[in-house]
Image: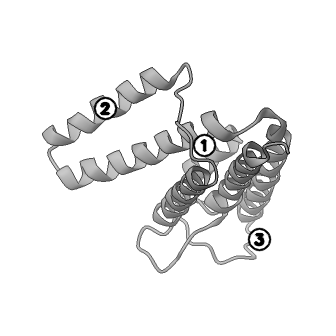
Amino acid sequence: MPNVRPQETSRLVAFGCSTLLVLVPLVYWTGLRDYALPPKLFILQAVVALTFAACLVIRAETISLPSLGLPACTYVLLNSSSVLYAADPVVGLHELNKMLSGFLFFLLVANWLRPHHFPHILTVGAACGILTSLVGISEWLWWRPFDIPSAGLPSAMFGYRNLAAMYLIQS
C-alpha cells in the first residue's frame, strides 16, 4: 500500500496557502481602531499555526531545514535576543511573534509543500489580486459598493493606499 501521508500533508499545506491568499487581503474589521492590520495578522498566524500543527499530527517526522534554514534560524535567534534590549518589550514581543509566524510558514512550505501545487496556489493569488484591484479601482472611481473606511483612498481593504499598492505589486 503506498504511503499517502505526504500527499495529504502537501494538499493540506496547499489549502492553507490558498486560504491565506484569500483571507489575508480580503478581511478587515471596522469594530477595531486599527481595522486593517490586526485581523489580517490574526488570520495569518492562526492559519499558519493550525496548518503546522495538523501537519505534525498527520505526519510526525523530523523537520528538516532547507539550504536557507541556517540563515533563517540565525536571523530569528538574533532578533529574539534583541527583545531583551528593546525600549518597549511588549512591542518587541509583538514583532517577535510576527517573525516567528513567518518562520513557521517558511518551515511549513519548505518541508511539506510540493511543486505540483504551485499553479493552483498562484491562480488563487492572482484571482485575489484581481478582486482587490477591482475594489481599489471602484474606490478610485468614487463608486464605493462597500463601506470600507480608509485613511487614504483607494485603499481596497488595506486601510491605506500604500499598503494596497504594496500588496498588488507583490501579487
The residue carrying mark 3 is 143
Residue at figure coordinates x 73%, y 55% from the top left: 15
Taking depth in this image into account, of 80 and 2 the one nearest to the observer is 2
Q: CA distance from mark 1 to mark 3?
A: 22 Å
Farthest residue to the front: give it. Answer: 1
Local SS, label 2: helix
Bin the neighbour count of mark 3 within 10 Å (Cα to Cα): few under 14, some 14-19, many 20 and up: few
Q: Position of residue 17 (x, y in %)?
A: 68, 50
Q: Position of residue 7 (x, y in %)?
A: 78, 45
Q: Earlier in the sequence, mark 1 or mark 3?
A: 3
The reply to whether residue 87 is visible in this rendering is yes
Q: CA distance from mark 2 to mark 3?
A: 48 Å
The residue carrying mark 2 is 77
Taking depth in this image into account, of 64 and 134 the one nearest to the observer is 64
Residue at figure coordinates x 80%, y 51% from the top left: 124
The residue carrying mark 1 is 166
Bin the neighbour count of mark 1 within 10 Å (Cα to Cα): few under 14, some 14-19, many 20 and up: few
What amino acid type should be assigned to the residue bearing mark 1? Met
